[in-house]
Image (cartoon, coloured by chain):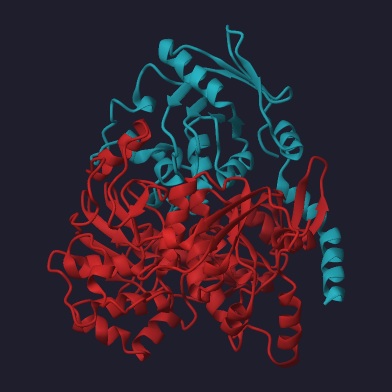
Chain colours: A cyan, B red
Amino acid sequence: MRNKFTTLVSTAVPLPIENIDTDQIIPARFLKATTREGFGENLFRDWRYDAEGNPKPDFAMNSPLYNGEILVAGKNFGCGSSREHAAWAIAGAGFRAVVSSFFADIFRNNALNNGLLPVTVSEAMAAEIFRAIGENPATELRIDLAAQTIEIVGTPRKESFDIAPYKKQCLMNGYDDVDYLVSIRTEIEAFEQKQKQKR
Amino acid sequence: MNTLFDKIWDAHTVKVLDGGSCVLYIDRQYIHEVTSPQAFAGLRERGIGVFRPSQVTASPDHNIPTADQHLPIAEPQSAAQVAALCRNCDENGITIFPIGSQRNGIIHVMGPETGLTRPGMTIVCGDSHTSTHGALGCVAFGIGTSEVEMALASQCILQSKPKSMRINVEGELRRGVCSKDIILYIISKLGTGGGTGHFVEFAGSAIRSLSMEARMTICNMSIEMGARGGMIAPDETTFEYLRGREFAPQGAEWDAAVERWSALKSEPDAVFDKEVTFDAADIEPMITYGTNPGMGVAVNGAIPASDGASFDKALDYMGFREGEKMAGKRVDYVFVGSCTNGRIEDLRAFASLVEGRRKAPNVTAWIVPGSKQVERQAIEEGLRDKLEAAGFTLRQPGCSACLAMNEDKIPAGKYCVATSNRNFEGRQGPEARTMLAGPLVAAAAAVTGVVTDPRDLMKPDETRQK
């Protein structure tokens, strides 16, 4: 069982940069662990820290203004390498949802498989969120998975988002794909038999 | 649905869940040391074994050294990861091609060259460049570690079916243009998100004319435009490539397989969700100037005007300015290798241009074969001798400076012309600056020490098309 996701109300950390690739999220030199833990401290390592390991003050995660469980990023977030370590790093740093106007496919799946909710919004909504946070870093976002909506709290700005129905069920109930697939091994064996006969 | 992609995907769909998620059967799974340990740990926690170990093949590639492979790996974390892969394979009855063994290599070089990858298959690996195998007419794509665990546990994964897209490249390629230039050109036109949500079939006369290895370079980089994968319908070129390979069918089985594979093509009336066509004559030797693979331009061209803050950030990182010509830019390192351009044809192309010339004194060059087989062939064909005569050395196989997980890192601030697939910030080492190109542009840079149009070094009648 994984953690269940229902609703989330939180402030957000803004990263208004396009095409953030998974090498930026977690550089390859930090992929050498054999467990899923500990990646959060190296999230956005080379943007967040200088070569000596000192925090770079101009990076949003290092600013005292911004915090929260939601990361808001520019379009095409998570492109590049398939490394699931990117999702582990974001979740490991305490985020539970990522909001962008466009996600790369593999990252989206990896996030969903780790209880990290990718919320795709319109470009206009993304711009509104960045503007609202820019004007007031205490701005809260409310994400309701059951209703599939995201809103800027205290404003009329509200939008619905798409999610595959199966993945939604998994997130809301804490289901796990491996458990499900193992439970249908008999069906998979029958499929294999059928395939062999076709040859 | 009658596209090549639909035919293979649908034939492998065990069932469709409410809302469209597919249980997709996987014919072959490849694993390496970086994205598999947590998957095996997950199986152990659940107390279940690998469902179909004979359909899984392992080859360590990501963080192995490319020199002194007969010695233990010096870096402790890399050594531990490779040791974990060996242990996990042994415990689960999975075939592994260990470092230094005859079949070891980068997964996406090893799979096709051993004949483990064959037309019509579904193939996954915890590596986004799994799309490479699509060149043989497979549905092959990268997955995350949770999905690696799913496939190990059930030989299936759960995915929504992607949309279909066809990219046609028609006409004859110009002199000095290779397949890397084609794909860099396509990505520069469509952008790094241009294929997102889609599975791409590459077609058209220019694609058909390519060798098998050149096709792999194209499919390899389909992920760099965001596509789930890329594929090319199998044809005589495919069959000739596979014939006689170690794990390819033999005798009567071969004939039956070729007959089956010959049906793997999109029907004439197939409809794609998205279709674009390019003219091969428009494509020139390419190079990238920015920090994503879509930021490419003709090597004899100039950096385009800025289109916003993300563009400016990229140019700032590279130390370039809009409007500057690429030719003549300083080059400190040249990297030839990776699952994109680490095959024998790439080494041949590079060697053909450096032969009779000398490595520029300001350039450090790493020439890294994609596999032991490529290394062996390079030695047997005399390519290594040619390289050494020109001042280059041939290293041992591995992913190397493509992602710099081993010792092969480009130092901060240095410029590297790389035949690999990603020019992201820090990809080749913290603050390293990468310019992606094909093996001919890399060769021209290696002998002149600056970005150079390879056609300037070629005789007028040379084409060196791949």
Q: Residue B336: image x %, image y %?
A: 33, 68
Q: Quadrant of the N terminus of chain A?
A: top right
* Residue drawn 41% across the image and 68% down it: B178
Judge left or right: residue B384 versus residue B129: left
Q: Residue at x 22, y 76 (%)?
A: B392
Left or right, B4 with reference to B194: right
- The residue positioned farthest toward the bottom in the image shown: B251
Residue drawn at x 64%, y 73% as measured from the top left = B234
* Screen quadrant of the C terminus of chain A: bottom right
Quarter where residue A146 is shown: top right
Give percent across and percent down for residue A187: 86, 59
Whether residue A96 is situated above or below residue B253 in the rendered picture: above
* Residue that sits furthest to the top in the current view: A154
Left/right placement of residue A21 relative to residue B438 reads right
Quarter of the image for residue A190 reads: bottom right
- Residue nearest the observer in this picture, B201 or A26: B201
Which x, y percent locates residue A58? Answer: 30, 26
Q: Where in the figure is residue A41, as x and y percent of width and height?
A: 41, 37
Up-down: is B234 above or below B42?
below
Horizontal arrangement in the rendering, residue B11 relative to residue B95 (left or right) = right
